[in-house]
Amino acid sequence: MSDRLNSLLADFHSRLELCVDSQALESLKAEFLGKKGPLTELLKSLKDLSPEERTRVGQATNDAKTAMEAGLASRRAALDKIALDEKLKSEWFDVTLDAAPSRLGALHPVSRVQYEIEDIFSSLGFSIQDGPHCELDYYNFEALNIPKDHPARDMQDTFYFENGAILRTHTSAVQVRAMEKLKPPFKIIGPGKVFRVERTDPSHEAAFHQLEGMVVAEGITVAHLIHTMKTLLKEIFKRDVKIRLRPGFFPFVEPGFELDISCQICDAKGCSVCKHSGWIELMPCGMVHPNVLKHGGIDTDKFSGFAFGLGLDRLVMMRFKIEDIRHLHSGDLRFSGQFV
């Protein structure tokens, strides 16, 4: 019986070396280990042996079966490795080659300038405030010295909701919300988007960006306003920029001014953006009206302040020499991609 088992094992291993694929392995397994294979026949014949021989032959048969199964597993692993190596050879690629070009994202030019301005004002001790786009009439008009019957409301064509709320027409609403939270002295800016019913042209849009500023303390004068604006523009343009103040009427400041900047697109020679005047209206500004301070609960006998509303989109246009404000809101990647 031992000779027969040794012969079977030798025959099995010689046949195993000839197997070159999984199908051949399965055939060999069925031939030697299947229900009609020689090992199964040996196990069936154990009943005819004596107890001592049955134990010895049964153990030897099981050892032979274990050896065959191990041989099949080893050969299958070897064939799998050969197949994998062949696949890797056929599908090989050079990982050292340059990757396909990809476009990097970048900040929108308005965001870039806004963050830069925030950094400038933060370095001057200003805090950054925010307010909702959908605003209450009180914050957008009444608390800014513009009651319901005030003719100044006609200066700003407003988007109204059915419930009486509005889309804010200026970031000046941030002033009132800030005064409700802060106690003087304080310095704040409030950047954000505002909305007006406008006929669009190269310098006007229905939705655009402003940056509100306000300083309240003892002894604040127009000189502080002019110095702050000159410092801001010099930091943004990296050089001295020519400005001018014109008298302007705004209910929330008294006296009020229009601050103009020399057109950086045409070098003050005249173009469609500056309407061929050489000047760009950049921001309304002035000394905060006492009524506005009173709405904020501030003692007007002790404190005064100045405020300004910076046209952020127009400043971006001056910075990057953009000739049409509508480019900033177009969503055109060909335009935005120039500022990567």
Image: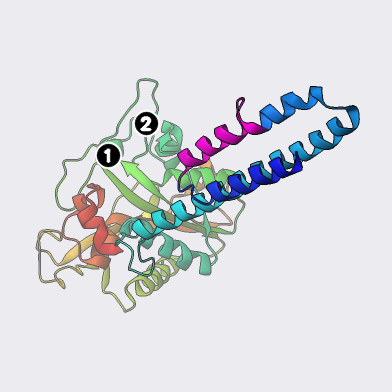
- State which quadrant residue 86 falls in: bottom left
Between 187 and 132, the one nearer to me in the picture: 132
- State which quadrant residue 267 falls in: bottom left
Magenta stretch holds residue 259: no
Image coordinates for residue 193, horizontal then vertical, percent: 36, 46
Q: Looking at the image, tell me whether mark 1 or mark 2 is earlier in sequence order.
A: 2
Image coordinates for residue 54, horizontal then vertical, percent: 84, 30
Question: What amino acid is at disc 2?
Answer: Ile
Image coordinates for residue 15, horizontal then vertical, percent: 53, 47
Question: What amino acid is at disc 1?
Answer: Arg
Q: Residue furthest top?
A: 162
Between 319 and 126, the one nearer to me in the picture: 319
Count of residue discs = 2
Q: Mark 2 points at which residue?
A: 166
Q: Is residue 311 visible?
A: no
> On the rendered image, what quadrant is the C terminus found in?
bottom left
Say which residue appears at 46% left-offset and 61% top-offset: 118
> On the rendered image, what quadrant is the N terminus found in?
top right
At mark 2, the secondary structure is strand
Task: Judge whether 291 appears above or below 45 on screen.
Answer: below
Q: Is residue 88 visible?
A: yes
- Span of residues in magenta: 21-38
Q: Is residue 20 left or right of residue 178?
A: left
Residues at marks 1 and 2, CA–CA distance in whole angstroms: 10 Å
Q: Tell me whether circle 1 and circle 2 mark residues in contact (CB < 8 Å).
A: no
At mark 1, the secondary structure is loop
Say which residue appears at 14% left-offset and 48% top-offset: 201
Task: Judge whether 226 appears above or below 335 on screen.
Answer: below
Q: Name the residue under label 1.
A: 196
Q: Residues within 10 Å of mark 1 (few under 14, many from 20)?
A: some
Magenta stretch holds residue 24: yes
Between 144 and 2, the one nearer to me in the picture: 2
